[in-house]
Image (cartoon, helix red, strand yellow):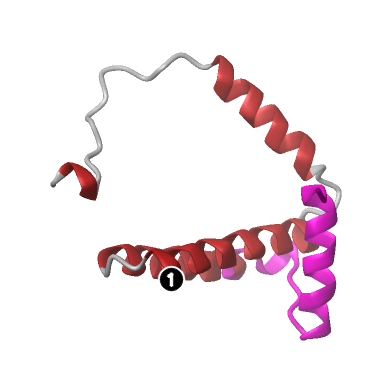
Amino acid sequence: MKSLKDLAKEIQTIEHSKGHKWSWQIFDRALKLLHDEVSEASDAWCNDDKRIASYELADALIRILHYFADCLPETDIDFVIENILDRNRKRMPHHNRKKIHSKAEGD
């Protein structure tokens, strides 16, 4: 399996061939496009369309990896993700927070 860094480089190559390049100076615009992908996934959830939701989330993931490659190329994505996962494994469960209800729980 490819590392996230390798996948990000592959995505970057594809996106650059299409003329899509990002930089830290316009990172805010990149994040707005990411928000659009997540919003489309939310719309798919509202329409109970798991196929579209999965594609929109995949699009968001591709955008995130492209942003890492273009805007944060010095970042070792695999290391950062593993570090955060390790921290989350050790984190105590959060208490005294309102329970977030899912659609399955019958809002």
Q: Nearer the viewer, residue 89 or 33?
A: 89
Determine the residue positioned at 64% across, 30% down. 84
Residue 106, image x and y in percent?
13, 46
Residue 47 vs residue 8: left or right? left
Q: Position of residue 32 (x, y in %)?
A: 51, 68
Q: Along the horizontal axis of the image, is 63 left or right of 92?
A: right
What residue does disc 1 label?
A: 52
Up-down: is 1 above or below 22?
A: above
Asked if 8 appears above or below 21 in the picture, the reply is above
Magenta residues: mostly which secondary structure?
Answer: helix
Residue at 26% in and 65% down: 46
Going by the numbered disc 1, the residue's amino acid type is Ile
Tag 1 secondary structure: helix
Please report the bounds of the magenta region as a residue range: 1-29
Q: In which quarter of the image is residue 6?
A: bottom right
Question: Is disc 1 surrounded by few (<14), some (14 to 19) or many (20+) residues within 10 Å?
Answer: some
